Image: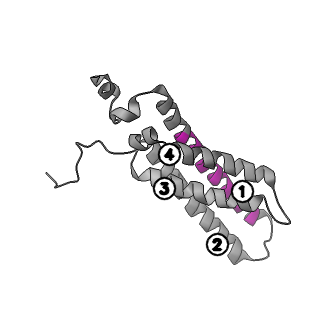
Amino acid sequence: MNRDRAEGDMPPAASASGGVKVALVVVSAILVLEALALIAVVVWLVVDLLALQPSSYATAIALIVLVLVGAAWVSAVAIGSLRRAPWTRAGAIVWQVLQVSIAVGAFQGLFARPDVGWLLLVPAVVVIGLLLWTPVRLAYTRPEHESAPGAD
């Protein structure tokens, strides 16, 4: 029964099946792809700013800064997820909820883009579902023997 503990630093319940390992890889892979996509959007916006004349430079620069901050945040969450840092789970869920809200907006209105909506909605739902699955949630927790500094 103690064979589960030989799986490294994952809690025993989180290391019990190969399905959990696949789920962890899927979560991290989707987060990395989302970070790369945001970086690509930043590059695209900068090229557009340099090549075209925006109706408002202030708005264009503000949009670039906001997307750059988002790209930095999602990149940090993706890197933390690869390391199974406990704080990344919450950050990833927040990002996925924001992505769901953008996806919902993409399905509606005069300029609706269902293709973009599905492209945002599917990975967001997958990541949220996997991060809420108990074995994956446990994989992102610190082992019990690690305590806060100075708590000994």
Image location of residue 87, percent across then percent down = 41, 53
Mark seen at residue 91: 3
Residue type at tag 2: Ala
Image location of residue 28, percent across then percent down = 52, 41
Residue type at tag 3: Gly
Front of the two marks 3 and 1:
3
Image location of residue 111, percent across then percent down = 84, 63
Residue type at tag 4: Leu
Residue located beneath label 2 in the image: 62
Front of the two marks 4 and 1:
4
Q: Earlier in the sequence, mark 3 or mark 4?
A: 3
Real-space Cα distance between discs 4 and 2?
32 Å
Verify CB contact (< 8 Å) between mark 4 and mark 2.
Answer: no
Q: Could you tell me which secondary element the residue under label 4 belongs to? A: helix
Question: Is residue 71 something that shows in the picture?
Answer: no
Verify CB contact (< 8 Å) between mark 2 and mark 3.
Answer: no
Judge whether residue 150 is colored magenta: no
Q: Earlier in the sequence, mark 2 or mark 3?
A: 2
Residue type at tag 1: Trp
Picture layout, residue 143 above or below residue 90: above
Mark seen at residue 131: 4
Which quadrant would the N terminus be assigned to in this image? top left
Q: Earlier in the sequence, mark 4 or mark 1?
A: 1
| Residue count near mark 2 (Cα–Cα under 10 Å), binned few <14, some 14–19, many ≥20 | few
Real-space Cα distance between discs 3 and 4?
11 Å
